[in-house]
Image (cartoon, rainbow, N blue to C red):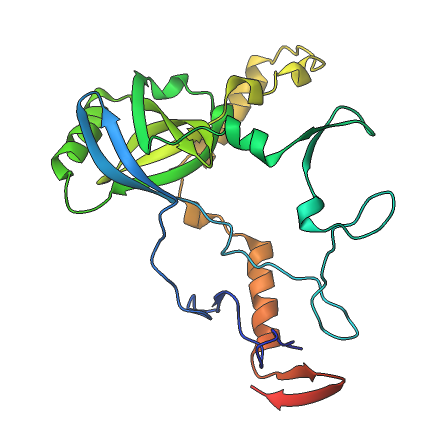
Amino acid sequence: MILPTGRGLSEPTRPVRLESGICVGVPRHGPRANWKGFLRLSLVSCPVALYTATSESEKISFNQLNRQTGHRIKYMKVDANTGEEVANEDIVKGHALDKDTFIEVSKEELEELALESTRTIEIDEFVERSEIDPRYLIRPYYIRLDGKVGHDAFAVIRETIREMGKVAIGRVVLTNRGHIIALEPLDKGLMGTLLRYAYEVRSDEYFDEIQDVKVTKDMLDLAKHIVNQKSGAFESDNFKDYYEDALVDLINSKRSGKRSRRRSGLGVRMSSI
């Protein structure tokens, strides 16, 4: 059953992967930069743009619907104690000290704390890749030259990092907050990975109760033999998201050759697609 979107007959809000690998749905648009500014290494700088390197939007997602009407479910902001709806202008932010005590913070106070973006990624230092704990990695971005000027400067920064075999550590302001970013060469561009601050990473005290077990040589040799048999190059295409594929098949089976149920007012009208 295909339900309407409120604009007439149901329209797909995102492409659906068919069995052939072809996608159907709304047309794709070119990538949109998440941030634009300058990349600077000492006196060398060039205009760059950041693009998210990963995406969750390709996965199948669902809306909650009213089974009886087919309409989408709407959420209202209500007072937890009175149950009454609260207007947006009456909603403020508050930090919880305990279950019933909050420190209220106004929009103006937050704006005063917000960092003013210099629109520049400042490279502060260079480190070995192995020195960056994987727990600090947050999110990768593609970084490319923005515009038609600065090719020489961009190439100098990229190739310097490549030749030194290190990772450049810089600072960037995104959405009013300062972030650490690690820069590495990737093909003709750069990959920038946001890093967590030290206070965001938990200690490894979770391992304290694991017993110290002495592994025998025979057990270790057997395990190494298994590892050698299963060793190979990592190819992401070798790993399939079977649940996602099953969802795509389910959506496609409901979509192809079916009749859509269009709701208009109090009536129900059947129309072919």
Q: Quadrant of the C terminus?
A: bottom right
Q: Which residue reaches farthest left?
A: 152
Q: Is residue 79 above or below residue 98?
A: below
Total number of numbered discs in the rendering: 0
Placement of 248 over or under 267, stated as above or below: above
Query: In the picture provided, is 259 more to the left or to the right than 171?
Result: right
Using residue 64 as the reference point, say whether residue 165 is left or right of it.
left
Spot occupied by residue 129 in the image (x, y as percentages of width and height):
35, 21
Q: Nearer the viewer, residue 27 or 18?
A: 27
Residue at 51% x, 28% y is 112
Q: Position of residue 235 (x, y in %)?
A: 40, 44
Residue 7 or residue 138, whichever sits in front:
7
> Which residue is drawn at the image coordinates 37% and 62% (left, top)?
29
Q: Going 48% across and 69% down the picture, which residue do you hit?
A: 19
Q: Give the answer, above or below, for where 152 lies relative to 12.
A: above
Of the 4 image quadrants, the one containing the N terminus is bottom right
Residue at image coords 31%, 31%: 120
User: Which residue is at the far right?
Assistant: 82
Residue 212 in percent (x, y) is at 66, 10
Between 39 and 160, the residue placed more toward the observer is 39
Where on the picture, by quarter, is residue 119?
Answer: top left
Residue 236 spot, x, y in % from top left: 43, 45
Is residue 152 left or right of 200 when viewed as pictured?
Answer: left
